[in-house]
Image (cartoon, rainbow, N blue to C red):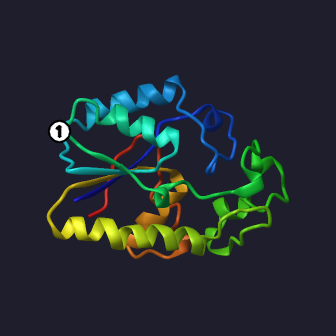
Amino acid sequence: MLYIIRHGRTDWNDLHKLQGQTDIPLNESGRSMAREAADKYRDVHFDICYCSPLIRARETAEILLAGRDVPIVFDDRLREMSFGSYEGVENSFNIPDCPINVFFKKPEEYIDPPGGAESMDELFGRTGEFLKEKVYPDIEEGKDILIVGHGAMNSSIICQVKDQPVSKFWDAGIENCELKRLI
């Protein structure tokens, strides 16, 4: 089985700031969400957890799996999508010409803006490589896998596993600390 979960809430989530790869920790609400998820999903078996190295995902994985004998393996390919110089922008939808807004409204039309933002091809490339190198071989061995990550990164994995077009990128509704079974 393959399961995926998004990290708990952060102060930047609450402020509607674009986080991307900026390393923001969980806030107390996010830690509480992770503790509730640990209780809610305590009977779901995991052989291994692959996790983004960003602190909000790390904290979520550590809280979620506390007291369980599940190794947590960090992989840079599971970092959130980079929004480059737009990371930290608050309430981007109040900025009509903010190019990142296209990503959230019409992801199939998104073109990475100058300033270090990652393209959809780059995101899908690194997460697709991760699926091929780590996840699919583990599934073939019969392992139950948990991925702890982020909204956009998780969405790219869901699209690839379910063979969905980019236009359906946000259809899964990636809520904080909500476990989804993919395979």
Residue beneath the point at 15% across and 67% down: 141
Up/down of 15 relative to 134, above or below: above
Q: Amino acid at mark 1?
A: Asp
Query: Is residue 179 found left or right of 106 in the rendered image?
Result: left
Image quarter (top left, top right, bottom left or bottom right) of the N terminus: bottom left
**Residue 22: which quarter of the image?**
top right
* Residue drawn at the location 44% of the way across and 35% of the way down: 59
Q: Position of residue 50 (x, y in %)?
A: 35, 53
| Residue 8 falls left or right of residue 101 | left
Query: Helix or strand or loop: what does disc 1 sit on?
Result: loop
Q: Nearer the viewer, residue 15 or 21?
A: 21
Percent coordinates x, y for residue 113 in the rendering: 77, 67
Position of 1 with respect to 72 (left or right) is left
Quarter that holds the C terminus = bottom left
Q: Residue at x 85, y 59 (%)?
A: 97
Disc 1 marks which residue? 43
Judge from the rendering whether residue 118 lies leftward or rightward of residue 44; answer left or right: right
62 and 41: which is toward the camera: 62
How far from the left and from the top, in percent, is residue 44? 20, 44
Identify the residue at image location x=70%, y=42%.
Answer: 17
- Mark 1 packing: few (<14 Cα in 10 Å), some, or many (20+)? few
Is residue 147 positioned above or below 109 on the image?
above
